[in-house]
Image (cartoon, helix red, strand yellow):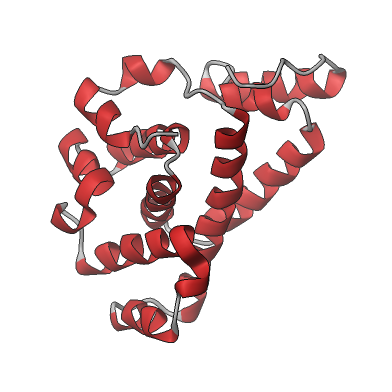
Amino acid sequence: MSHLQQAEQSPETERIFDADTSAMGYLPNYTRLFAHSPAVYLAWQQLNGAVKAEMELRRYELATLAAARALKSSYCGLAHGKILRDKFFDASTVAAIATEHGSADLSAQEVAVVTFAGKVATDASSVREADIEVLRGHGLDDTEIFSVILAVGARCFFSTVLSAAGAEPDPQYNDSLDEDLRRALSFGG
């Protein structure tokens, strides 16, 4: 499951295990990992929920997938690629977004968001006003741009924790995603 040994069971860990099992239909490996710090996991859920609530789900998922790709997070790539496939695109389009988003069936605005999100995740200090102007030119206002930045920042935290701890993607992705899509969404970490 990860490089770390399983956390000790407690009433708090049981609550998060029960909640995630109820929501997902299984207990994700990341939940087992965060059992080492339930308070941080609950704070993460609150933060991520607040970020997600302030943007369109499709944009959130595109920015999140771009960040996962930049961070080489297979776990997050598989999870968010599956959501994009289930809610917005067919499998081949999601694979194209994951590998070469400029050739995918995305609007010009979405291509700009994915490009920007990847840049933020790769090297946030390299973002310049010109990068913001590109997004403004595609119709995003500053609040929407800030929401993309927040989504990427939140993903950087989560993906980094999962990758550093060696959390393996849930085996359920093997059943729910075809092999070509799994390969495209497996970024190496």
Q: Judge from the rendering whether residue 137 lies leftward or rightward of residue 26; answer left or right.
A: left
Is residue 64 visible in the rendered structure shown here? yes
Q: In percent of the image, x 25 and y 63: which residue is there?
A: 111
Residue at the image position 24 percent from the left and 48 percent from the top: 97
Residue in the foreground of this view, choosing between 88 and 7 = 7
Where the C terminus falls, by quadrant? top left
In percent of width and height, residue 108 lies at 21, 68
Q: Quadrant of the N terminus?
A: top right
Image height of 111 relative to 88, above or below: below
> Is residue 89 among the parts visible in the rendering?
no
Of residue 88 and residue 122, the one placed in the foreground of this image is 122
**Image label count:** 0
Q: Quadrant of residue 119?
A: bottom left
Where residue 110 sits, quadrant-wise, is bottom left
Q: Looking at the picture, does residue 153 appear above or below residue 126?
A: above
How far from the left and from the top, in percent, is residue 59?
38, 57
Instruction: Name the residue rendered at 38%, 21% in the picture.
Output: 173
- Residue nearest the viewer, comparing 124 with 85: 124
Q: Position of residue 104 (x, y in %)?
A: 16, 52
Q: Which residue occupies 58% across, 21% down?
A: 29
The residue at the far right in this view is 11
